[in-house]
Image: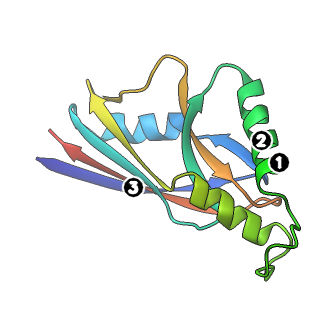
Amino acid sequence: MRQASHTLDLASRGRGLTDFTAAVEGFVSGAGIRTGLLTIFCRHTSASLLIQENADPDVRSDLERFFARLVRDGDPLFEHTTEGMDDMPAHVRTALTQTQLSIPVAGGRPVLGTWQGIYLWEHRTRGHRREVALHLIGE
């Protein structure tokens, strides 16, 4: 068994999904591991990871609108507003989604469906720099 790791520095433009599939595919192909398991981990509490459709941008917009209805900015329920009215809603959005993905690797590529992409989901309203750790183990 061999292992490879790398950290991606991703820039978000504020709330929404940022596709970083190509960066992940580049890491996997460069690692020289043909078969294994890729773990992707977001090192933040107000952003998350998502595998989602990459063909129709309406899917991403619909997800954003659904979460805006589900977890409203400035909701008086929340006491934690240290960094603004979107602070606690961002934490709740992260708690409802995921900060870690496991993706099989075969033939030196992540095993994704035809219309699947890997996304960083920024839950804050302004842009941030986000670190995403990649770890690949296999042969």
Residue 95 appears left or right of 11: left
Q: Secondary structure at mark 3?
A: strand
**Is 18 rendered above or below residue 97?**
above
Give x and y (percent) for residue 31: 29, 42
Q: Secondary structure at mark 2?
A: helix
18, 63: nearer the viewer: 63
Inspect the image, locate mark 1, and give the three-letter code of the amino acid beneath it.
Arg
Quick one: label 1, few (<14), some, or many (20+) residues within 10 Å?
A: few
Query: Label 1 vs label 2: CA separation?
Result: 5 Å
Q: Is residue 112 left or right of residue 9?
A: left
Q: CA distance from mark 1 to mark 3?
A: 36 Å
**N-terminal label among 3 and 2:** 3
Q: Are marks 1 and 2 in contact (CB under 8 Å)?
A: yes
Q: How is the image coloured?
A: rainbow
Report which residue position mark 3 lands on.
6
Residue that label 1 marks: 69
In the image, what residue type sits under mark 2?
Phe
Identify the residue at horizontal 58%, vertical 32% (top origin): 52
Q: Quadrant of the C terminus?
A: top left
Quadrant of residue 62 within the rendered picture: top right
Q: Residue furthest front?
A: 77
Residue type beneath disc 3 = His
Residue 18 x, y percent position in the rendering: 67, 43
Q: Position of residue 8 (x, y in %)?
A: 51, 54
